[in-house]
Amino acid sequence: MELTINLKIGQIVKSKKGRDKNRVFVISRILDERYVLICDGDLRKLNTPKKKKVKHLMIYNTVLTEFAEKLKSNENLDDAFLRRILEPFAQNSKNVSEEMEVE
């Protein structure tokens, strides 16, 4: 019995597995209950998102509604905007992992 997670477009996630491990992304599309498309505007651009298994993601409660609304209406959405809104989450993620390594 698998726990169903209520995913949303614009939700912040962090990769737990793969070469993109510990990177912060945003969900750009939900394919089904097992797969989503994620992007970060840097390694994974908006026009070439990464297909990722949900079980390989740490899912945060934060949803970037501004991103989701812009994605839905296709307005002023580019990789620079995505990097800018993800930056605080990426910085916070690096600080947490650095603190864990020190201890």
Image: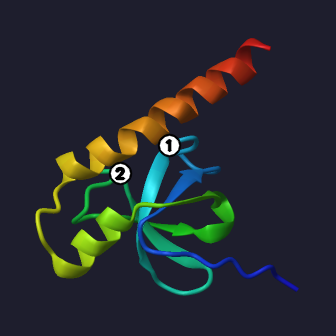
Q: Residue 99 location in percent, x, y? A: 69, 19
Does residue 19 show up? yes
Secondary structure beneath dot 2 equals loop
For label 1, the SS is loop
Q: Residue furthest top?
A: 102
Structural crowding at the residue carrying mark 1, measured as other residues with C-alpha within 10 Å and reported as few (<14), some (14–19) or many (≥20): some
Q: Is residue 58 left or right of residue 10?
A: right
Q: Residue at x 28, y 52 (%)?
A: 82
Q: Which residue is mark 1?
A: 23
In x, y percent, where is residue 18? 58, 50
Circles 1 and 2, Cβ within 8 Å, touching? The answer is yes
Q: Amino acid at mark 2?
A: Asp
Question: Residue at left 41%, top 66%?
Answer: 10
Which coloring applies here?
rainbow
Q: Which mark is residue 73?
A: none
- Tell me which label, 1 or 2, sits earlier in the chain: 1
Instruction: Give the answer, above or below, for where 37 lies relative to 15.
Output: below
Q: Residue at x 62, y 69 (%)?
A: 54
Q: Amino acid at mark 1?
A: Arg
- Residue 3 placement: quadrant: bottom right
When the figure is inspected, residue 75 is found, relative to residue 40, above or below; the finding is: below
Q: Quadrant of the N terminus?
A: bottom right
Name the residue located 73 percent from the left edge and 12 percent from the top edge.
102
Q: What residue would you read off at disc 2?
A: 40
